[in-house]
């Protein structure tokens, strides 16, 4: 069916009103330059965090003494955390996987709102080893992240970034749950994660105050928090790759986190600056049956819980890395009815160094009745074809859509084409405009 001129103008006006979203192209976590100043982070009541630990202890006691992967105590732990988050307005997702012949669970909680192209994540593994309740390892990190998420809800926070929280299964078996999560995450979705904050053992009874030395912005955020409360920190050295942040780091996501120590021994110099007992391990109950609610230093748990909130509030309000350069064509290009050949709308790109990013964004604005007729491709300067739309959408009119394309193998400069072919008779239209953002 052909569009009358007035119909086209009306349709074009409607489309123009639809507007085109410019994506934020997240890169390594940029130093926070907040558009709106972040509200003051809340104090996280350590009593609330300890109440979660008491619940996790009770769960262990009611389920054979542990909360390990594949055991009933782990699923009961997941159910406890999920119920709190559902009641607080989070969008929760239970992700299942299989490891060592048992079903594992990851819990993901999204706080509605924020820029979907700039996601700040925080997480902790919720499983224990089979020898005990796992209250410091890692009820402490799980409870602190949970209470911070609940504080986000209580405050009705509206950060510029989208906040996502994760509780991972089977970390003790080898980071299984977090590896599964990132492996399942499409490349384009990974690119949107501006940072992942990991909290594994943050209430050790003979605590140290260690900050992961990974992403510099995240590291500095934590150091600034601890400097503000007069607590010296050290770089975490007990082992890169020994917790869930490694799963995220391995796919190129900026990471950071906090740690109060496990089986390593506190030195005299450390006891001088932090208190506690030199010559004793930071957590004598690491991976043991005595890792229960008595195996927590309240001051360390309190300080680290407040540090979680400080990081979420400050990094969550950082302005996403501004989108890269974009190029647009607003030239109308008619799309002849099937069985005509495809038409092209060219954009000449220049002045962009290097290759296009994995998160190259293509905004398409096509006026056409029955969009199910259309095949739409992005054609790179070297002729590589990236299909954007292939006859989906049925009888609905017009195609106003943003696509993220991994064009990282393409040199950015050159002539890019939006190629459109009408593959079914009786409906026609035109390319109203399209834009490519690097
Ligand atoms: N692998 C963690 C404990 C652990 C040991 N070293 C580090 C360093 C950084 C974070 C955590 C850890 C566990 O047993 O769950
Ligand atoms: Ca507190
Ligand atoms: Zn452990
Ligand atoms: Zn742990």
Image (cartoon, rainbow, N blue to C red):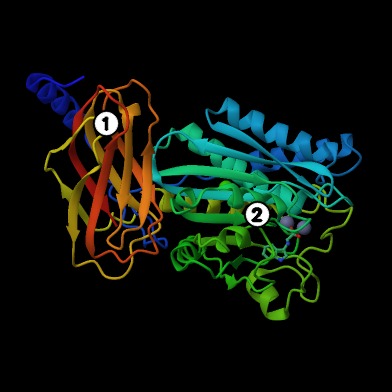
> Which tag, 1 or 2, sits closer to the chain's start?
2
Looking at the rendered image, the disc whose residue lies closer to the viewer, 1 or 2, is 1
Q: Position of residue 419 (x, y in %)?
A: 26, 45
As drawn, the residue found furthest toward the front would be 339
Q: Nearer the viewer, residue 126 or 395?
A: 395
User: Of helix, strand and loop, which one carries label 1?
Assistant: loop
Q: Position of residue 124 (x, y in %)?
A: 65, 50
Residue nearest the observer in this picture, 92 or 407: 407
- Disc number for residue 179: 2
Residue contact between numbered discs 1 and 2, judged by CB atoms under 8 Å? no
Residue 289 drawn at (x, y percent): 89, 53
Circle 2 residues within 10 Å: few <14, some 14–19, many ≥20: many
- Res 323 seen here: yes
Give the answer, above or below, for where 1 lies relative to 377: above
**Residue under the image location 62 percent in, 59 percent down:** 247
Q: Position of residue 145 (x, y in %)?
A: 60, 46
Q: Which residue is located at x 62 percent, y 48 percent?
A: 181
Residue at which label 1 appears: 338
Q: Is residue 364 left or right of residue 191?
A: left
Name the image quarter holding the N terminus: top left
Residue 160 can be seen in this image: no
Relative vertical location of residue 10 with respect to residue 336 in this rendering, above or below: above
């Amino acid at each position: 069916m052909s569009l009358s001129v007035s119909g086209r103008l009306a349709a074009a006006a409607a489309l123009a009103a639809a507007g085109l979203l410019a994506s934020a192209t997240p890169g390594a976590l940029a130093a926070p330059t907040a558009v709106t100043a972040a509200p003051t982070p809340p104090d996280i009541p350590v009593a609330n965090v300890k109440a979660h630990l008491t619940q996790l202890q009770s769960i262990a006691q009611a389920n054979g003494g542990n909360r390990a992967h594949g055991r009933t105590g782990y699923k009961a732990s997941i159910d406890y955390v999920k119920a709190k988050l559902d009641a607080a307005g989070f969008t929760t997702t239970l992700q299942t996987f299989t490891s060592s012949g048992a079903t594992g669970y990851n819990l993901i909680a999204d706080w509605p709102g924020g820029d979907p192209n700039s996601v700040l994540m925080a997480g902790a593994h919720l499983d224990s080893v089979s020898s005990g309740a796992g209250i410091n390892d890692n009820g402490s990190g799980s409870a602190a992240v949970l209470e911070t998420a609940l504080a986000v809800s209580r405050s009705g926070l509206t950060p510029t970034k989208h906040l996502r929280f994760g509780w991972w299964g089977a970390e003790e078996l080898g980071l299984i749950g977090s590896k599964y999560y990132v492996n399942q995450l499409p490349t384009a979705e990974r690119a949107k994660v501006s940072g992942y904050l990991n909290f594994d053992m943050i209430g050790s009874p003979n605590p140290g105050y260690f900050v992961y030395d990974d992403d510099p912005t995240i590291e500095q955020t934590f150091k600034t928090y601890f400097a503000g409360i007069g607590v010296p920190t050290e770089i975490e050295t007990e082992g890169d790759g020994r917790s869930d942040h490694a799963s995220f780091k391995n796919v190129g996501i900026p990471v950071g986190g906090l740690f109060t120590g496990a089986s390593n021994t506190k030195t005299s110099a450390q006891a001088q600056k932090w208190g506690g007992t030199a010559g004793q391990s930071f957590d004598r109950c690491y991976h043991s049956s005595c890792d229960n609610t008595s195996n927590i230093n309240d001051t360390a748990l309190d300080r680290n819980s407040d540090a979680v909130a400080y990081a979420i509030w400050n990094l969550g309000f950082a302005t996403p890395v501004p989108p890269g350069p974009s190029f647009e064509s607003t030239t109308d290009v008619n799309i002849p009815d099937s069985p005509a050949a495809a038409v092209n709308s060219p954009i000449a790109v220049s002045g962009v160094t290097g290759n296009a990013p994995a998160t190259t964004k293509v905004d398409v604005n096509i006026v056409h009745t029955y969009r199910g007729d259309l095949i739409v491709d992005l054609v790179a300067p070297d002729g590589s074809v990236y299909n954007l739309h292939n006859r989906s959408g049925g009888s609905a009119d017009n195609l106003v859509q943003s696509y993220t394309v991994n064009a990282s193998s393409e040199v950015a400069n050159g002539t890019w084409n939006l190629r459109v072919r009408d593959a079914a008779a009786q409906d026609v239209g035109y390319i109203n405009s399209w834009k490519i953002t690097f």
